[in-house]
Amino acid sequence: MNAATTLMGEVPAEERQRVDAEESYQRFLERLSHQSVVKHYDAYADIPWDDPAFAIDPEDPRLELSPDDPLGATTWYRAQPAPVRARIGLHMMANFANIGWRFESILKRGLLEFTARLPDDAPEFRYCYHEVIEEAQHSLFFREVVRRTGMPCRPPRILHLAERQVIGFARRFPELFFFFVLSGEDPIDYTQRQMLGSGRPLHPLIERISRIHVTEEARHMAFARQFLRRSMPQVRGVRLTLLRVRTAVVMKVASLFMSRPSRRIIRTYGIPAAALREAYGRGSRGEEHVKRALFKPRELCWELGVLDARWAWLWRRLDIYAPQGSPV
Ligand SMILES: [Fe+2]
Ligand SMILES: [Fe+2]
């Protein structure tokens, strides 16, 4: 029992509520930290990389894009020979893993910046370090996967250009930083959960990595959401306007990277413009996929006033709008 609790009878109701909220936030962070201690993974000890069943054959039919994937559903893709379909699936997966570890690299540096400005008794400090350690393990396995596929991948230039700025936000404008975090983590999580729940036979290496990632990311996203719920009420005026605009743009950009083939992939396999339009154009399956992948962070934006009736135009303009409570 802390000093504030012993004084409960003497403090006004508003102050008591604040102390209660503070204590439950601290308990929530303690629970997350405890989970990180009892349920965590090592990129090399917990993945049998050299098990022959985990070897990657680029023509393995389990690597093909699913018929629910926007590109996988196109007439062009279905008309390709099976080995080409598998290679495209593998190359896209390697590209997402490559973007994934580079995104996590920015995220880790941002978290370290964020913790550097915290007071000594801040409850977030310990949990953020658990998260940095987990993200480092994820980067190890994502990078190892990219290496083992042998597929050439380069990250989008914009990620490189934005990294300094995003890391700076972690120190100066953490609310914006944590929306950036969710804009990357939520769509990846959505895609991995869809894949794991699809009932299709999956390559064991991809399945293992996805299961580990989904488990640990659930904690990271829960922390980001709680942090934002607690600190967004203090963001007002120009900062709130800036956050509204930047969050919508970042959500759009991040979700596109995590759902479309890179230019290199388009060139390598000669994917025609008509197939890309069919997959990702207006009213396409790809547009719906992006909206669904952004459902959770968009709902948080509705809840916290980052998206409201006055700002809906911006989200519509970016083709990522959906009414509150609706995935599309
Ligand atoms: Fe991760
Ligand atoms: Fe994460």
Image: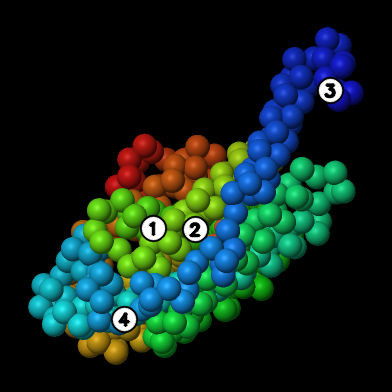
Label 2 residue near ligand 1, CB within 8 Å:
yes
Mark nearer the N terminus (2 vs 3) = 3
Amino acid found under the numbered disc labelled 3: Met
Residue at which label 4 appears: 57
Q: Could you say where residue 185 lies in the image, as x and y percent from the top left?
A: 50, 57
Q: CA distance from mark 2 to mark 4?
A: 23 Å
At 50% from the left and 51% from the top, the residue drawn is: 215
Q: CA distance from mark 4 to mark 3?
A: 58 Å
SS label for mark 4: loop
**Image position of 5 with respect to 247: above or below:** above
Amino acid found under the numbered disc labelled 2: His
SS label for mark 1: helix
Of circles 4 and 1, which is in front? 4
Q: Is residue 256 left or right of residue 214?
A: left
Q: Could you say where residue 26 lies in the image, as x and y percent from the top left?
A: 73, 36
User: Cβ–Cβ below 8 Å for labels 2 and 1?
Assistant: yes
Of 63 and 230, nearer the camera is 63
